[in-house]
Image (cartoon, grey):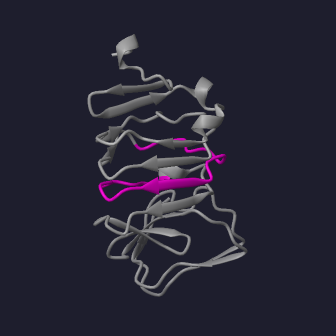
Amino acid sequence: VNTESNWTENGVLYLDEWLLLVDMLRAGDSELDVFTVKDGTRGVASGAFMANGFAEIVFPDSVECFDGSYYSFNNIVEKITFGAGVKTLTGMMFSQTSGEIIISENNPYYKVVDEFILTKDGKELIYCFRTAKELTVPEGVEIIIDRAFASNRSEKIILNEGLLEIGE
């Protein structure tokens, strides 16, 4: 798998339709402050962005899945953009991220409302990516999944009346 022919000139390891690893030694290159995953990539391996130094990461519409639950989009990342194809997001993916997160309006599974990633129907809160003195969980949220507030340092979080379940 880790053969020289699978590496791109920018130190990125792809295998078929999967992004496996971004060489962290190249993360400081000024040309790579914004990293855009190659169009046609369907999946991203867990750990592909460990210890990177990118200011921005862009996932095209072709990316559907993330293998594993833990991604270290570290706190250096200022902006992460997901295309219309992404089907699974978890709070664990963003446990060290406090930058801006954008999800395509054409994504049928997720949306961003203020500082929250929600399922498209607004019933599950996936992640809160901003810290404020006080945050209010949006109306309509019934479930807060595990680690939804993993990197949040807000002093007060106001829960809504319709909330049914809170993860760890």
Q: Compared to 72, does 80 lie above or below?
A: below
Q: Give the residue at x 61% y 24%.
A: 25
Q: In the rendered image, which quarter contains the N terminus? A: top left
Q: Give the residue at x 33% y 54%.
A: 86
Q: Residue furthest top?
A: 4
Q: Compared to 2, does 14 lie above or below?
A: below
Q: Position of residue 137 (x, y in %)?
A: 53, 78
- 155 is within the stretch colored magenta: no
Please indicate, yes or no, whether residue 127 appears anywhere in the rendered image: yes
Q: Residue furthest bottom?
A: 161
Q: Position of residue 116 (x, y in %)?
A: 51, 69
Q: Compared to 95, does 100 lie above or below?
A: below
Q: Is residue 4 left or right of residue 137?
A: left
Please indicate, yes or no, whether residue 3 appears anywhere in the rendered image: no
Q: Position of residue 22 (x, y in %)?
A: 49, 30
Report the predominant secondary structure element of the magenta stretch: loop
Q: Give the residue at x 37% y 76%.
A: 122
How many numbered circles are shown?
0
Q: Please give the range of residues in magenta.
A: 69-91
User: Which quadrant of the structure image shows residue 156?
Assistant: bottom right
Q: Position of residue 21 (x, y in %)?
A: 45, 28
Q: Give the residue at x 39% y 77%.
A: 142
User: Which quadrant of the structure image shows residue 73?
Assistant: top right
Q: Residue furthest front?
A: 31
- 70 is within the stretch colored magenta: yes
